[in-house]
Image (spheres, rainbow, N blue to C red):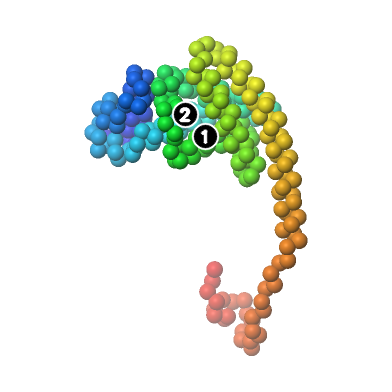
Amino acid sequence: MLRESQKIDSIIDAALELASERSWSEVTLPDIAQAAEMELSALRDAVSSKDDIIAAFVQRIDKKMLGEAANVDRSSAPRDALFEVLMSRFDAMEPHKRALKSIVGLQIPNPDLIKTLLQSQTWMLQAAGIESEGLKGGVRVVGLMSVYASVFQTWLEDDDPGLAHTMAVLDRRLRRGERSLGTADNIIGSVEGLCKSMMSMWPKPSTPRGPETDGPTSSNPEASGSAPL
C-alpha cells in the first residue's frame, strides 16, 4: 500500500502530466484518478478538489526550494539572498512549466489556495534570512507576493535555458520592492512606536483588594485551601 506522501505525489504527477497535454479546465478528477492508477474513492481520500492538488504541488515546491536554499548565504545583502531563493524556486518548477501555463489564470484561487501561496512567500523570506513575523513581516509577505506574481508571469514565457530575462526582471523588481519596503518599514516603525507610547499613557486598571480574613497565610496550597496550578 502506498504511503500518504507517495499517494499525493502520484496524484500531483498525474495532474501535471494531464495539464501539459490539454487545458487544465478540461482535466477532471476522474481523469486524474485514472492517470494516477487509483480508484476515484482513493483520490477522494487524499484531495477534495483540483485546487487541493495545486496546493499540494506548491508545498512540494516549497520543500525543494528550501532544500536548495540551504546553501544561500544569509550574511549577504537581503536582496541578494532573496534573489537566490526565488531563482531556486523557478529552477524547481522548470520541468513543469508547460503544465503550469495550462493551469495559471483559468480561475480565481480559493481562499485555502491563496493562504498556501502566502505561506510560500513566508518560507522564501525565512530561507533568505528575512524576518516574516509581526506587522512588518506581514507587509514583507504581501510585498513579496506582488513581486513573485509579476516575475512568475515573466518566467512562464522565458524560454531561455539560462532564464536571463527572468533574472533581469527579478533583480529589477526586488530593487524596486526594497525601496518600497524600506519606506513601509519606517512608517510601520513609527506607528508601532506611537502605539506603544499611547499604551504606556493608558491608565492601568486597579486591582481590587479582596476582603481581609483571619485565615491561614501560609503559601502551602493545602494550608490555604487553593488548588495547585
In terms of image quadrants, where is residue 72? top right
Which residue carries the number 1 mark? 120
Quick check: can you spot residue 34?
Answer: yes
From the image, which quarter does the N terminus lie in?
A: top left
Q: Quarter of the image containing the C terminus?
A: bottom right
Q: CA distance from mark 2 to mark 1?
A: 9 Å
Lateral position of residue 61 relative to residue 136, left or right: left
The image shows residue 114 at horizontal and vertical percentages of: 48, 37
Please state the horizontal and vertical placement of residue 51, each as a whole percent of the image. Answer: 39, 34
**Residue 164 higher or lower than 60, as above or below:** above
Along the viewing direction, whichever of 95 and 66 lies nearer the viewer: 95
Q: Answer whether residue 71 is visible to the viewer in this image.
A: no
User: Decide: marks 2, 1 in contact (CB < 8 A)?
Assistant: yes
Residue 77 location (% of width, % of height):
69, 27
Q: Secondary structure at mark 1?
A: helix
- In the rendered structure, find residue 61 and report the number of the disc placed on it: 2
Residue located at (72% from left, 58% from top): 199
Question: Residue 179 appears in which quarter of the rendering?
Answer: top right
Question: Residue at horizontal 45%, vertical 41%?
Answer: 111
Disc 2 is placed on an element classified as: helix
Residue 59 placement (x, y as % from top left): 45, 33
Dividing the picture into quadrants, the one containing residue 167 is: top right
Residue 213 drawn above or below residue 70? below
Q: Amino acid at mark 1?
A: Ser
Instruction: Looking at the image, tell me whether mark 2 or mark 1 is earlier in sequence order.
Output: 2
Mark 2 residue type: Ile
Residue found 52% across the figure and 38% down from its top: 119
